[in-house]
C-alpha cells in the first residue's frame, strides 16, 4: 500500500499491478497502517479512513478538526490518530466511533502516536510528549522534550525514545516519563528513530 498526493494504492506484490485505488479530496501525507484486514490512513481533508484491505472499499471515516498527517496506530480494538488540531483520538476499530479525544493544546504534525503497555504516546509541536491511558485518554504524565516532536515515539523494554526537530533524542521511562538520558545531535532531525 502506498499513498500519493490524492490517492491510496494497493499493489499486487508479485506483479506490481494496481489491485485498487482510493481517492481523497485532499493530499494523503500519512503512511497507511494495515491491521485486521483493513487499511487505516489519515488525509489533509481532516479525516481518518478505514478501508477494506482486499477491495479498497470504505468501511468508515472519522472527521477531526484539522489535517491528519501522521499514520494511525492500531491496538486493543482501537485506532489511535493525531491531528493538526492538537488532539489525540481513540476510535472504535469496527465503526470509527470516537471512544475519546484528548486536547494537547498544541499543533501535532507528523508525530504519529505509539501504543505500548496500555499507554498511548504522542508528541506535539510545542515540544511536549504525553502518555495517555489507552482506554480512557486520561493523562498519566507529560514531559517537555526540548523542541517539536515530529516523529513516532519508539518503545523498547519500558523506555520511550523520541527525537525532536532540533536533533535531540530523549530516553524516558515509559511508566513515569522520568528522563533516563538525552542526546543532542546538534542537527535537525526529520526522520523517526
Image (tube, grey):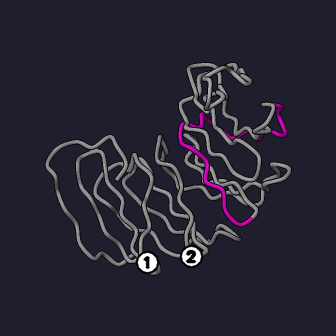
Residue located 51% across and 68% down the image: 131
> For mark 1, what is the residue?
158
State the image coordinates of residue 123 (x, y, percent, origin top left): 45, 55
| Residue drawn 16% across the image and 52% down it | 185
Of 167 and 103, the residue lying toward us: 167
Magenta stretch: residue 68 in it? yes
Mark 2 vs mark 1: which is more N-terminal? 2
- Residue at the farthest left position: 186
Residue 184 covered by magenta stretch: no
Disc marking residue 141: none
Q: How far apart are marks 2 and 1 (CA)?
A: 8 Å
Q: Where is residue 46 in the image (x, y as percent from the top left)?
A: 66, 33
Read off the magenta span: 57-76
| Residue drawn at (32%, 40%) of the image | 190
Residue 49, compared with residue 23, is above or below; it is: below
Residue 34 position, x and y percent, is 66, 46
Residue nearest the viewer, comparing 71 with 108: 71
Element type at marker 1? loop
Compared across the picture, whether 53 is left or right of 113 comes to: right
| Residue 102, image quadrant | bottom right
Q: Mark 2 points at which residue?
A: 117
Name the residue at 24% across, 46% down: 166
| Nearer to us in this view, 14 or 189 | 14
Which quadrant would the N terminus be assigned to in this image? Answer: top right
Amino acid at each position: 500500500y502506498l499513498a500519493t498526493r490524492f490517492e491510496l494504492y494497493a499493489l499486487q506484490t508479485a506483479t506490481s499491478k494496481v489491485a485498487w485505488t482510493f481517492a481523497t479530496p485532499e493530499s494523503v501525507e500519512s503512511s497507511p497502517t494495515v491491521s485486521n484486514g483493513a487499511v487505516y490512513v489519515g488525509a489533509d481533508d481532516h479525516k481518518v479512513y478505514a478501508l477494506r484491505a482486499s477491495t479498497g472499499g470504505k468501511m468508515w471515516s472519522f472527521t477531526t478538526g484539522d489535517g491528519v498527517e501522521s499514520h494511525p496506530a492500531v491496538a486493543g480494538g482501537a485506532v489511535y490518530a493525531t491531528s493538526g488540531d492538537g488532539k489525540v483520538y481513540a476510535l472504535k476499530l469496527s465503526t470509527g466511533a470516537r471512544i475519546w479525544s484528548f486536547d494537547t493544546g498544541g499543533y501535532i504534525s507528523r508525530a504519529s502516536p505509539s501504543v505500548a503497555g496500555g499507554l498511548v504516546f504522542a508528541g506535539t509541536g510545542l515540544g511536549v510528549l504525553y502518555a495517555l491511558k489507552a482506554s480512557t485518554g486520561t493523562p498519566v504524565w507529560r514531559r517537555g522534550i526540548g523542541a517539536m516532536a515530529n516523529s513516532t515515539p519508539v518503545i523498547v523494554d519500558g523506555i520511550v525514545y523520541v527525537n525532536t526537530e532540533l536533533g535531540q533524542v530523549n530516553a524516558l521511562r515509559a511508566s513515569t516519563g522520568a528522563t533516563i538520558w538525552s542526546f543532542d545531535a546538534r542537527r535537525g532531525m526529520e526522520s523517526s528513530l
